[in-house]
Amino acid sequence: MSSILIVLPILSLLMFDLGLELRARDFAMVFTRPRAIIAGLTGQILLLPALVFVLCRTFGIDGEPLFGLMLIACCPGGSSSNVFSGIAKGDVALSVSLTALSSIITLITLPLILGAITELPVGKLVMQNLVLVLLPVLIGMAVKHYRPENAARIHKVLSKLAFPLLMLLAALFFVGNREAIINNFAQLGMIITLLILLAMGGGWFLGFLARLNRREKRTLVIEVGMQNAAQAIALSTSPLVFNNARLAVPAIVYALMMNILLLTYVAIVSRWKN
C-alpha cells in the first residue's frame, strides 16, 4: 500500500479532531485578546520562515532540504499543541484559537512564501489544503455544534491518538527513506534542533514583548515550537502537489525532534507550582 494512502487520512483525522474543539468564538479571540493572538501568529507566520532562512544561509543549506524546512515553517501549529499546553499548565483556550487561526491563515501564506522560493502548483496545493485541512475542521466544528456530547467522546479518543499517529507517519517514511534520512540526519538534526529551540525562545520573547502572563507565554512557546509535521509530509508526498518523498525528510526529522524537545519542556514546566 502506498504510504500516501495512510498519510492523507491521518492528516484529515487530526484536523477533524481540531474542529471538535472549536467554537466560532475561538476565532473571535483576535478581538478579545489581540496582544496574545498577534504575538502568537507573528511567531508562527513570520518568525519561523525567517529562522529557516537565516539557518539555511548560515549552514549553506539549499535545494530540497531548504524547501523541506521552509515547508515545515509555513505549516500551521501542530494538532497536539492544545494537549501539550494543558499538561504544561498553559492557556488552552489561547492554544486552540492560535492553532485554528494559523490553520486558516496558512492556507494563504503557505503558497505565497513557498512561491517565492520555487514555482508551485498553486491551484492543486490550495485545493488539497481545502479538502484535507479546512473541510475536516469545519465538519468537526459542525459535530461539536450539533452533537456536543458525541464530539466530546470522539475528541477524548482522537486526542490520545494524535502523538502515536504522527510517530506512525514518521516510522513509515523512515522505513521508505531510511538511507536519505540517515545520510542527512547529522546536519538536518542539528539545524532542526536549533530551529525548534529558537522558535520556542522566540515564542517566549514575543510573549514578553506583548506583556503576557506566564500561562500565555508557555502556550506561545509550545505553539511556535510545534508545527503540523503531518501536513508537511502530506504536501511533500501527495501526487497532486509535490510528489517528492525526499521533501518529507526534514519533516520526519522535525517530528522526532519536536516531540523530544517539547515533551521535555512540558515535563519541566508542569512540575512548577504556577
Image (tube, rainbow, N blue to C red):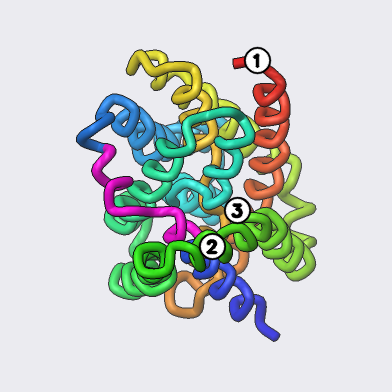
How far is mark 3 from mark 2, CA to CA?
16 Å
How far is mark 2 from mark 1, CA to CA?
31 Å
Q: Residues within 10 Å of mark 3 (few under 14, many from 20)?
A: many
How far is mark 1 from mark 3, CA to CA?
34 Å
The chief SS type of the magenta part is helix
Most extreme residue toward the left is: 31
For the C terminus, the quadrant is: top right
Residue under circle 2? 14
Image coordinates of residue 171 in percent, x first then y, are 76, 62
Q: Which mark is residue 273?
A: 1
Residue under circle 3? 251
Residues tagged 3 and 2 counted as in contact (Cβ below 8 A)? no
- Magenta stretch: give its range: 17-29
> In this rendering, is residue 95 above or below 7?
above
Q: Residue at x 53, y 22 (%)?
A: 201
Image coordinates of residue 53 in percent, x first then y, are 44, 37
